[in-house]
Image (cartoon, rainbow, N blue to C red):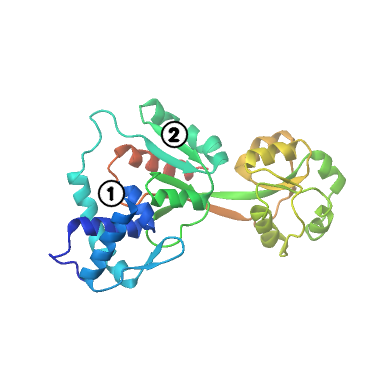
Amino acid sequence: MEPSHHLDLNLLRTFLAVYRSGSFTGAAQLLGLSQPTVTTQMRTLERQAGRELFERLPRGVTPTAVAEALAARIAAPLDELAVVAGPGPAPGRADPVHLAGPAELLCLRVLPALAPLAAEGVRLRVAPGLTEPLLDELRAGRHDLVIATTRPRGRTLNSTPFMDEEFVLVAAPVWAERLGDRPAAELPAALHPVPLVTYAQDLPIARRYWRHVFGRRLSGPAAVTVPDLRGVLAAVAAGAGFTVLPRYLCLDELASGVLVALHEPEDPPINTAFLVQRPGAVENPDVTRVHELLLDAGRTW
């Protein structure tokens, strides 16, 4: 589909917001319009184009091939126009940077890294949460940057590898002593009666460790579930059982002996986190400053 002179610029802006947010509701929030207005505008644009642009889903929409081609042609020009025509921040006072990600990573690594920018006057609005809901909110314009524990699906979000998390199997010394010095092949059976502490009922980190290191599925439910890895760390350090944690989170506890690594495989499982930026032109220079500083810091973690 070729955008032409008879296509209204406002319709194209609305189309791009729907394409990037993945829903009419998200586009309405981005543009400050009502959802029925967005729906009407998209119907008008589809009628003018003579083609369907979005497939309606039970939750949101997905672009057709025609929409993908149109977005590729108009995104950059519309973003440039938004920068030129936009009101911009008040002189000397940029808008706050809205940043979101996993609570423990934000608290232990990200906020200390951003302290120099905060001291220079950069304003931050930080929100913890799980990756998928945060990415939905990013598409809807609620955040500028999201630290995601998985690569975002689709091509509407710009993501950059941020840092690698190495996972380690740990327990308090009392449990390590009971388990003794066992070969790796015997560890899964030996750990079966030991309480498992995790941050989610589906055991995502522990299941991944079992599959990668032991080559088998992890069986058995969690004994304790805490939706914050810092809580998992505290429970295990107090002797509640065993768990799998990102190494950065428990470096001090491992060094002091509060926790013991039950196994140190030559090829530990690693997860890559991504720094994801809100679609569209970056009008706030502080967003770019935060983005660049975090990428630099992530290379050293």
Contact, CB < 8 Å: mark 2 with mark 1?
no
Q: Which residue is rendered at x = 42% and y = 62% of the image?
A: 154
Q: Position of residue 36 (x, y in %)?
A: 32, 56
Q: Which residue is rendered at x = 39% and y = 31% of the image?
A: 117
Q: Which residue lies furthest to the front in this view?
A: 36
In the picture of the structure, the residue carrying the numbered disc 2 is 114
The front one of 147 and 11 is 11
Q: Position of residue 222 (x, y in %)?
A: 74, 51
Q: Residue furthest bottom?
A: 50
Q: In which quarter of the image is residue 285?
A: top left
Q: Which residue lies furthest to the left in this view?
A: 5
Residue type beneath disc 1: Ala
The secondary element bearing badge 1 is classed as loop
Classify 109 as above or below 119: below
Relative horizontal placement of residue 184, taking residue 270 as reference (left or right): right
Using a 10 Å C-alpha cutoff, classify the residue at mark 2 as few (fewer than 14 neighbours), some (14 to 19) or many (20 or more): some
Relative horizontal placement of residue 216, taking residue 28 as reference (left or right): right
Residue type beneath disc 2: Leu
Number of numbered tags placed on the structure image: 2
The secondary element bearing badge 2 is classed as helix
Classify 243 as above or below 218: above
Relative horizontal placement of residue 230, taking residue 35 as reference (left or right): right
In the picture of the structure, the residue carrying the numbered disc 1 is 281
Q: Quadrant of residue 267?
A: bottom right
Q: Where is residue 96 in the image (x, y as percent from the top left)?
A: 36, 34
Q: Which residue is rendered at x = 68% and y = 52% of the image?
A: 201
The front one of 168 and 59 is 59
Q: Where is residue 169 in the image (x, y as percent from the top left)?
A: 71, 49
Locate the N terminus by quadrant.
bottom left
